[in-house]
Amino acid sequence: MSEAERMRLVELASEYDTPQVRALLGLILDSGGQDVATLKKTLNPTTIYKLPVDKGAWPLAKDWNIR
């Protein structure tokens, strides 16, 4: 994914999607080595997102408060 495409995806997620979607998108992009600081700023750091994510396959899930 190009930088412009990633930025557009983050922009759309930041403006329209629920926090759970932003956390999941952040996890996916972060796991791919993408810069996700802008997206992470849109999330409440104390909120826990209960999503059915395999923690073994997605070790960065805890960094996104996905439990």
Image: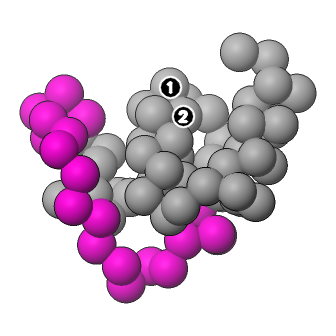
Q: Are marks 1 and 2 in contact (CB under 8 Å)?
A: yes
Q: Amino acid at mark 1?
A: Gly
> Is 5 placed above or below 64 here?
above
Query: x, y percentage for residue 55?
Result: 14, 41
Residue 4 belongs to magenta span = no
Marks 1/2: CA–CA distance: 5 Å
Query: x, y percentage for residue 14?
Result: 70, 58
> Is 57 placed above or below 23 here?
above
Q: Residue at x 21, y 61 (%)?
A: 50
Quadrant position of the C terminus in the picture: bottom left
Q: Amino acid at mark 2?
A: Leu
Direction top: furthest residue: 1
Q: Residue at x 37, y 84 (%)?
A: 46
Instruction: Tell me which secondary structure the magenta stretch mostly adopts.
Output: loop
Could you classify mark 1 by the number of other residues whose Cα lies within 10 Å: few (under 14), some (14-19), or many (20 or more)? Answer: few
Q: Residue at x 23, y 52 (%)?
A: 51
Residue at the disc numbered 2:
29
Query: x, y percentage for residue 9?
Result: 73, 36
In front here: 21 or 55?
Answer: 21
Could you classify mark 2 by the number of other residues whose Cα lies within 10 Å: few (under 14), some (14-19), or many (20 or more)? Answer: some
Residue at the disc numbered 1:
32
- In this rendering, position of residue 25 left or right of residue 4: left
Tell me, yes or no, if residue 62 can be seen here: no
Tell me, yes or no, if residue 48 can be seen here: yes
What is the span of residues highlighted in magenta in the rendered image?
A: 40-58
